[in-house]
Each structure stands twice: as C-alpha cells, then as structure tokens.
Amino acid sequence: MKDTLTNRQQEVYDYLKRESRETGVMPSTREIQHFFGFASQTAAMNHLRALEKKQVIQRVPGKARAVIFPDELDREEIVDIPIYGNIAAGMGQDVDHEKEGCLSIDIRSLGLKHNARTFALKVRGESMVDAHICDGDTVVLEFREPRKNDVVAALIDGETTLKRYVVENGKPFLRAENELFPDLIPARELIIQGVLVALLRNAA
Amino acid sequence: MKDTLTNRQQEVYDYLKRESRETGVMPSTREIQHFFGFASQTAAMNHLRALEKKQVIQRVPGKARAVIFPDELDREEIVDIPIYGNIAAGMGQDVDHEKEGCLSIDIRSLGLKHNARTFALKVRGESMVDAHICDGDTVVLEFREPRKNDVVAALIDGETTLKRYVVENGKPFLRAENELFPDLIPARELIIQGVLVALLRNAA
DNA sequence: GCGAATAGTGTTCATATAGATACATGAAGG
DNA sequence: CCTTCATGTATCTATATGAACACTATTCGC
C-alpha cells in the first residue's frame, strides 16, 4: 500500500513538511487550498486522504491541523547542543564564548542523560590525536566533575584546552595525547569546563 | 522577561512538550483543561498566555493548536539515518542487514547534502585505528562511487568490511589503517556499499 | 495596604476547521 | 466497455477551538 506519490501528491507532501518545519504549525485544509489555489477545500481533503492511504502521513479524526509524519513520531527525543566555537587541542588558546551554532541530535545516539548540561566545541590542533581526536572534530562535553583519565576541556592559567585529566600523587594536571606536546602543570588554577562525552567527525 | 517558570507552568510546559512529541499533535486549550482537570478552559488559556509572556512558547492568533516552541523552530532540518548493525573493521564479517536503530541528526552538523542516501554502521575491530576510527564508533556512509583513498564499507568476496579504498596500477583494493592488518586484494569482486562521510563516537 | 502576578471558576460568542455529499473529467488498466 | 484512481469544483454542516468578559482567592514585594 506504500505506493510512490504522484507529482501533485509530492508537492502537497513537501508543502506540509516545509510549512510545519518553518512555521511550527501544520497547515489546515483551507491553508492547503489557498496555497495551491484550489477553488474547493475538498481538493485539499482528497490529497490528505490520498497521502494517508499511502502511509506517508497520519491523521487524527476530529482534531484541527492533526496531520502527523509517522517517521518523525518514532524518533527519539532531540536535544540542541550549543557550539561555543573553537578549542585548542594544541597549545592553550582562549575559547570564544559566543554561541556559534547548534548541534541537534537524538539523545540515545550520544548516550546522554536527559538532564545533562552539555555543550560542544570544535577541536583545533593535533595534541589529542593519539586519543583519536583530530583537528576539525566536534567534541561534546558535559558539565560535571572529571574523573581520573577523563578527556576534559580545561581552563588552565587563563587559557582553554582539550587534554586528558590525570592525577598523580594527588595532584591533577593535563596530559596531551601526542608525544610532541608536553604535560601542562597548572601554575595557579585548573578549572574544568567540561568532560568529553561524545565526538563527531565530518569526513566529507 | 525570560523569567523562570512556576511549578504549575513547568507542568503545563512539560505536558505540551511531551504530548506534541508523543502524539505529533499539539494539545488544544480544552485538552489541556481536561488533562489537568480544570473546571474552566480559561485556566488553560491563562497558562498559555503566561508561558508566551515568558518566551518559552509562541502562539499564532486565530489558528487552532498553534503553539510553537521557539528553540525547535530555528533548528536545522533533521534526517533519520538507519543503523544496519555491525561492520568489521578487523577481519571481514557479514553485515547484518536488519535495521537495528536510527540516528537522528541535523544535516548541517554532518555536512550532508539533502538528497544524499546514507546509512550507519557500528564499527567493530581495530583495523582502522590509524585513521582514528575506533572499535565502537558509529560510521555514517553515503551510497555513492568511491574516490581514491576514501574510507569505504565494501563487500569483498562475500564479506563486508571497513577499509581504505586504494587504487594502484589501475587496480582497486582495500587497505587497513593498522600495520597489523594486511591489504585485501579482491579475488573475484569488490562491491562498495558506501563511502564514509561522518563518524560518531560515544565516549561516555 | 496596594498593585501585580499566579491560579483559578463560569459563561458566552465568533470563527476556524474537518468532513460529508453530489458532480465532473481525464488517464490507466483489464 | 467498465472500473478505479487522480484531481478537481461547488455547497452545506457540525463541531472543534480560540478568545473575551466578569468574578474569586492567594501570595509576594514594596
């Protein structure tokens, strides 16, 4: 029963999808009618019925604007993770604290808890390559206390960097995962901004 | 003006969010009324007005069920990428061709084209570690012709594996990115199932 | 002690909206 | 030739829904 759509039906489907995404509200039959210039509202009704029959939408009888896209329905919950700019995985550098963009992904794929406070940063530099974190990767970090050997974004002596959090003899410091980079021993303060929970790489 | 919500307002907000996500349809004022057991529909109206004043929802006057979550609105378009199971990045192994789950992410974060046909696989094995692809990573692959030195999922002599696609002297073969693994020269056939476009790692 | 915000009840009204029914036309398929 | 499906027009109806108005009670800051 999941036939292919006709051209006209595809147009209507695309309109519904686009409109509900851009405005946040599903069009009513009359809005569909006016958009396509139908003289009768029944034309819109017919198209909705056809789309429903072909399983690409669902409808709830008796409710206004109650058109549903089934594949969006069984989706996991989606979280928006703000991207705060670059972080040096090479030598320390200031983090830009302006929100530069947003990463939207379902929680299960990142294995996040629902209430976790997270943010993302773009990695610059090669100092974490031995932990398989590369220049250009996007790292997702969670606001929480670090455990030993976590990878963390840390503010060390006024600069932010991505390194492994190591504790030796009760003293915490930061270690690069690249032989060419030295350990960072905090002179004054070591503020952990976030702990690595996930990573995203764009290979294309 | 973006005050914190009262307990009651948070309850209403959560109800709207949950209901619209689970059913696909935004509740009407009467549905809110009945859910909370209000004797009057005005109570629901008041809460909506309060939530709107505090900027956590938006409404379109005169339209039915026209409650919008502003942060969902300026989200990028989200694509659903089916996960087809495991792929060996070690020695060749059969790919499970049942859909095991789904990855939902906005297209811009993966840098995908809107029309690209993609799927995802869980990596097993260490043969691609030198390309910083680890055991347990999820790779996103695009259905398309490989270019030289792309990382690909390939069906080689009946088994699927993740390797680098190399061409030497006009002959294509597969190379592991780990000294411990040998090159794979196709005896009969080399079928490319997908080209790596993105990678996802769950560190937690 | 006053005003504003919160959280409601009770009632009424206008209209937004789904939905049904009758009819038309052209293309596809058996 | 007849049926089905796609794509419409034209008209009418029941109800789903937002919205306004009058009124009450409590809490909180000033």
Image (cartoon, coloured by chain):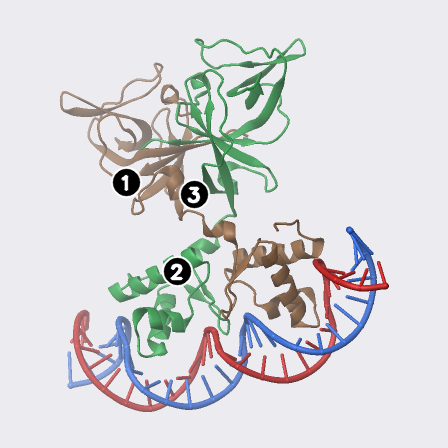
Chain colours: A brown, B green, C blue, D red
Task: Tell me where residue A155 appears, x and y as whole percent.
Answer: 28, 33
Is disc 2 in the same subunit as disc 3? Answer: no
- Is the Cβ of the residue at disc 2 closer than 8 Å to that at disc 3? no
Mark 2 = which residue? B19
| Residue pictured at 38% horizontal, 43% vertical | A107
- Per the rendering, the mark at residue B139 is none
Residue A178 at least partly seen: yes
Image-based side of A157 in relation to B140, left or right: left
Specify few, some or many for label 3: CA neighbours under 10 Å numbering under 14, 14-19, or 20 or more. Answer: many
Specify few, some or many for label 1: CA neighbours under 10 Å numbering under 14, 14-19, or 20 or more. Answer: some
* SS assignment at label 1: loop
Image-based side of B187 in relation to A140, left or right: right
The amino acid pointed to by label 1 is Phe
Query: Gap in Å between the C-alphas at discs 2 and 3?
Result: 20 Å
Query: Gap in Å between the C-alphas at discs 3 and 1?
Result: 18 Å
Mark 3 = which residue? A105
Mark 1 = which residue? A143
Residue C2 lies in what quarter of the image? Answer: bottom left
Specify few, some or many for label 2: CA neighbours under 10 Å numbering under 14, 14-19, or 20 or more. Answer: some
C3 above or below A28?
Answer: below
Task: Tell me where residue B63 appears, x and y as whole percent.
Answer: 51, 71
